[in-house]
Image (tube, rainbow, N blue to C red):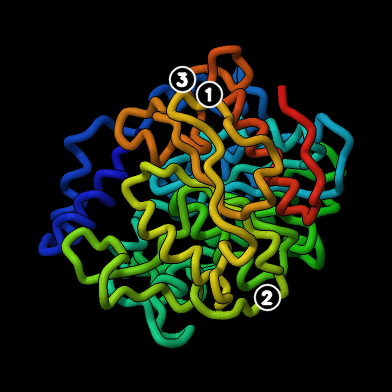
Amino acid sequence: MRSTHALRRSGLLAVTATAAALAALVVVLPPATASAATALPPCGSTGSPLGGVNPATTDPAISGTGSMAGTVCYGRPTGTPNGKLFVFFPGTGAVPSYYQDVLVQAQQLGFYTVGMSYNNGALAAIVCGSNTGTSPSTDCYGGLHLNRFNGTAESWSDTGSADATHGIEHRLTAALTWLAANDNPGWSAFLSNGLPAYGSLVVGGHSQGASEAAYLGSIRTVTGAVLFSSPDDCYSPDPADSCTTAGTTVAYWASHPFSSATPLSRYILATNANDPWITKVTAVEKVLGGVSGGLESFGAPVSVDNTAGTLTTAPPYGHSHVLLSNATGTSYIYPAHDEPVVDNDTPVCSTNSAHLELANLWRQMLYTALGSAAVAPAGC
């Protein structure tokens, strides 16, 4: 669906290539555009269900090009407000406007919603490779996520330099401050002492954005985390870097106890059984939080649909925290990787859309992140 996925594929299958050579491969593929990713106009445009604001509008000190400059998507609850904010992080090289459908479903459940742009231009697997670390200070993956979060751990920065102004924490703080002043005072409930009120946040993301969300929940106490097609922060020496062979290591941050009080029971993952990186995701989720069995400690993975995208298992899916989709997907580079959450070629609630079924999946995942054992109300 996006050209930067080619970077990932090349890096995993051609271990002798340099990062620079891999980056050069990107240009031969179609560029990432909103029209390629979604039938919806960009957030803030006529026809979009969500508002949009440029990051630099929220704070003129925020800069960046490409996906870092992507419009921040936002929306207030359309259902009964639940006092929570759902913050979503896009995958590598993607922008928030690619993920409007899941944000709309969260709004209908009573969430305030924000889709964040951030420094997501370089793939963690390319930046870090085998450097999974034996402590927080030696874990490249954790250091990279921390650098993107608040500008610290600069030695792990993929850009050579980073500061707090361009980190996720400041970007989110600036967005919430701007929204409270320019959209509705209700947004101020998600600020505390000049920072996001993390205890009121459910974080989520796709691909690299899911890794960032999972990491954030490990260092800040949040309500819960909704993850799609990741985290996959692991390494194995086999040519495909499958994380299934001897010598496989999972990033220290993911395989050890969280420094926050976020309970692992509030984490939930959906991925596609045919995702090219399913073995990496599985390796990580089985040890997440340093818990024996990781997310599978709450039950075995559950297959939720068939190849047509029709749900074959009803919510709440046995309260499993690992949900597997089998639908084909429609994006033009990696359909299985994008299928669980990227906006499809048809609107979320059309009668012929697989995302009509996914709406109910997303809603149940959000309920799990809230700590509710109830069946979420059906979408659309």
| Picture disc at residue 318 | none
Q: Is residue 135 left or right of residue 58?
A: left
Helix or strand or loop: what does disc 2 sit on? Answer: loop
Q: In this view, does 295 lie to the left or right of 8?
A: right
Specify few, some or many for label 1: CA neighbours under 10 Å numbering under 14, 14-19, or 20 or more: many
Query: As displayed, is residue 296 above or below residue 337?
Result: below
Mark 3 or mark 1: name the one nearer the start of the chain.
Answer: 3
Frontmost residue, 214 versus 328:
328
Q: Which amino acid does the dot numbered 3 rest on?
A: Asp
Frontmost residue, 103 versus 225:
225
Q: Distance between the residues labelled 3 and 1?
A: 10 Å
Q: Tell me what residue is drawn at x 77 percent, y 53 percent.
A: 370
Q: How far apart are marks 1 and 2 (CA)?
A: 36 Å
Q: Tell me what residue is drawn at x 69 percent, y 39 percent.
A: 315
Q: Tell me what residue is drawn at x 64 percent, y 39 percent.
A: 362
Q: Mark 3 points at which residue?
A: 345
Q: Name the residue under label 2.
A: 260
Q: Mark 1 points at which residue?
A: 354
Count all numbered tags in the image, as a single digit: 3
